[in-house]
Image (cartoon, helix red, strand yellow):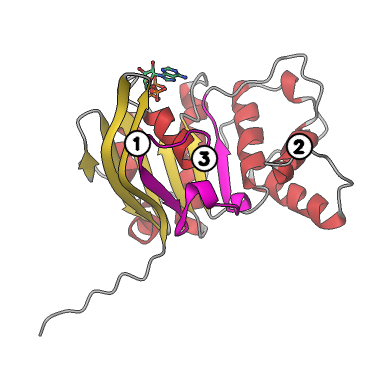
Amino acid sequence: MESLSLDCHQHIIEIEDLSFSYGEQKVISDLNYTVKERDFLGIIGSNGAGKTTLLKMIVGLLPATSGEIKLFGHPVRKFKDWERIGYVPQKNAFNPLFPATVREVVLSGLYNNKNLIRRVTRTQQRQCLDALEVMKIQDIADKRVGQLSGGQQQRVFLARALINHPDLLILDEPTVGIDAETQAGFFELIMHMHAHHHMTFLMVSHDIDMIKNYLGHEPVQSNGKINFYSRHSHEVQDCVVDNLQHTFT
Ligand SMILES: Nc1ncnc2c1ncn2[C@@H]1O[C@H](COP(=O)(O)OP(=O)(O)OP(=O)(O)O)[C@@H](O)[C@H]1O
């Protein structure tokens, strides 16, 4: 008897015949890929391959030259539900003199596309506390972010991206500039979240070993410059180490 295979996972990101050029320079060419609910997509590629450009198109910061991206079934240019997406851009770092506290930065994630700070409601305070607790930074909530270590700052950025309980978390080289031990702790945390929360992840990384370890040794798609590695969270639940080492300093 033929087995029936039903694909019941929602399509979170659909990339269809996507191309992008900066002027004459073609950076992305006829790319097709679908990220499904609870997938973890790791993107590896050399410098200048177009990884950040791709992420910027996915979050609506750059328009495609041709082709289309859909988020949760809607073309990105018409997409409005940005609370469903957490985005941590590349090379985040606060100026040491930046005056905002950890709590204020995390709360600002509530106002992603609106540049206004309104009175913070009790529910929003609760959301903030939840995000601080998930990232284990509640004890430094009132410290100035500019005075934190690189690893602690990364946790703040992640908490800011998590405050809206996003369905999709997009990370662009989240561990650049932080030490190896802190990186390992960060990746463990991300993997734990993937295995145990109902979230979809997209992460650009130069850490090929970490990506292969978690997502398998062979890319699921390669277009020469950019390699996609992917696994669904059900496949990895068993191999995630549960007792997280909190190695951030
Ligand atoms: N604003 C821009 N204007 C013109 N060219 C750009 C711009 N941003 C990026 N590029 C070029 O597009 C190409 C792809 O850049 P992109 O930042 O997407 O690469 P990347 O794969 O993320 O690289 P890296 O691993 O170094 O971060 C590079 O050749 C870069 O010089």
Name the image quarter holding residue 122.
bottom right
Residue lying furthest right in this view? 119
Q: Give the camera-side residue of 150 and 123.
A: 123
Q: Give the camera-side residue of 37 and 132.
A: 37
* Residue depicted at x 58% and y 53%: 84
Of labels 3 and 2, earlier in sequence is 3
Q: Is 58 covered by the magenta stretch?
A: no
Neighbours of disc 2 within 10 Å: few (<14), some (14-19), many (20+): few
Q: Give the secondary structure at mark 3.
A: loop
Q: Give the camera-side residue of 168 and 241.
A: 168
* Residue depicted at x 65% and y 41%: 159
Q: Which stretch is magenta?
A: 61-90
Q: Which mark is residue 224?
A: none
Name the image quarter holding residue 149.
top right
The percent position of residue 63, horizontal first and vertical second, equals: 46, 36
Q: Give the secondary structure at mark 2.
A: loop
Q: Is residue 113 above or below residue 46?
A: below
Q: Give the secondary structure at mark 1.
A: strand
Q: Which residue is mark 2?
A: 115
Amino acid identity at mark 1:
Ile
Q: Which mark is residue 60?
A: 3
Amino acid identity at mark 2:
Asn
The percent position of residue 86, horizontal first and vertical second, equals: 57, 44
Res. 139 in view: yes
Q: Quadrant of the C terminus?
A: top right
Ligand 1 located in image quadrant: top left
Neighbours of disc 1 within 10 Å: few (<14), some (14-19), many (20+): many
Mark pair 2, 1: CA separation? 31 Å
Left or right: 202 in relation to 226 = right
